[in-house]
Amino acid sequence: MNFCPPIPKHPRITAYADKEVEDRIERKDFPHVIHSTACWRKYIGTWEIKEGRLYLINILGHLKLDGEEPLFADWFTGELKIPQGELLQYAHAGFGSVYEQEILIKIEQGSVIDTKIKDNRRT
């Protein structure tokens, strides 16, 4: 996904204590990218759209999602961009690379309101 939806302040989202983070770094419990300049937010979120609703299903890094159930992303309104197909143009910054297609999903308060496919081979 070429977008990082924000993580809200929520009772089920907590930060690891500094000592826990240090211990996890030492044990190599985090992917290397979380401690590099490639991941300024210091976490990787895993998202899912199910039955027309966006959910946060996991957080890896300095934050954690408490409980087993996915968290409905009712705080999020915006557009998700999901690249598909072959890489057409590489950009070494953010999410600027261009792929053959993009799935554009409009979300309003966590619910999908529109989905489009953009074909970048025709631009």
Image (tube, rainbow, N blue to C red):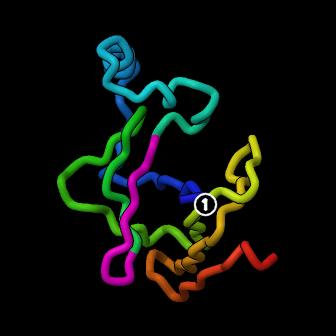
Q: Which residue is mark 1?
A: 86
Q: Is residue 45 magenta?
A: yes
Q: What secondary structure do most residues of the magenta stretch adopt?
A: strand
Residue furthest left as drawn: 68
- Amino acid type, residue under disc 1 in the picture: Glu
Residue found 41% across the figure and 67% down from its top: 73
Residue 67 rendering spot, x and y as whole percentages: 20, 51
Residue found 55% across the figure and 88% down from its top: 114
Name the foreground residue: 120 vs 39: 120
Q: Answer above or below: position of 78 versus 41.
A: below
Name the foreground residue: 73 vs 2: 2
Side (left or right) of 10 relative to 101? left
Q: Which residues are magenta?
A: 44-53
Name the foreground residue: 99 vs 55: 99
Residue found 38% across the figure and 78% down from its top: 53
Side (left or right) of 103 relative to 29? right
